Image: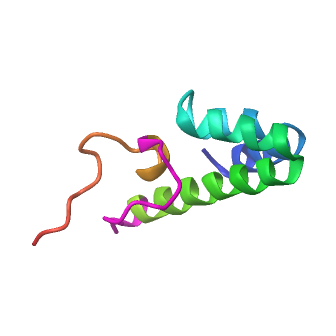
Amino acid sequence: MGAVSALFLVLITILVPPVGVYCVAGCGADLLINICLTLLGYIPGHIHAFYLEYVYYDRREQAREGRFQAARAPGVYSDRVQSGGHGYGTIVQPVE
């Protein structure tokens, strides 16, 4: 995703937060949590959606630079978000 795609995703998230979460995390626990938060209050749904998008793009940038964040981000259940969109062996594991 380039800058235009990220901007488009932010605009979608401003209008309907669960759609933005679906684009980043897919259909799973994060989407269900975001739908519930959006129904309880529009602002909590936005906060959760933008947090997921921040974690996604931050982890994606770290993976691109070759750095790996071993700790899981709190409150994020999607492996796609945790890995920055890279999955199953595409990120180099740190040497111990």
Of residues 5 and 39, which is closer to you in this image? 39
- 54 magenta-colored: no
Relative to residue 83, is residue 91 drawn left or right?
left
Residue at 51% x, 51% y: name it: 76
The vertical placement of 65 against 1, above or below, is below
What number of labels is visible?
0
Where, by quadrant of the figure, is residue 96 drawn?
bottom left
Task: Name the outermost residue toward the top.
Answer: 27
Q: What is the x, y in percent for residue 24?
A: 60, 40
Instruction: Look at the magenta stretch and give its main secondary structure.
Output: loop
Q: What is the x, y in percent for residue 12?
A: 82, 39
Of residues 73 and 90, which is closer to you in this image? 73
Q: Can residue 20 be seen?
A: no
Residue at 29% x, 53% y: name it: 91
Q: What is the x, y in percent for residue 53?
A: 64, 52
Relative to residue 54, is residue 39 drawn left or right?
right
Region of the chain picked out in magenta, as a range: 64-79
Residue at 54% x, 35% y: name it: 29
Quadrant position of the N terminus in the picture: top right
Colour approach in the figure = rainbow
Where, by quadrant of the figure, is residue 21 drawn?
top right
The vertical placement of 16 against 81, above or below, is above
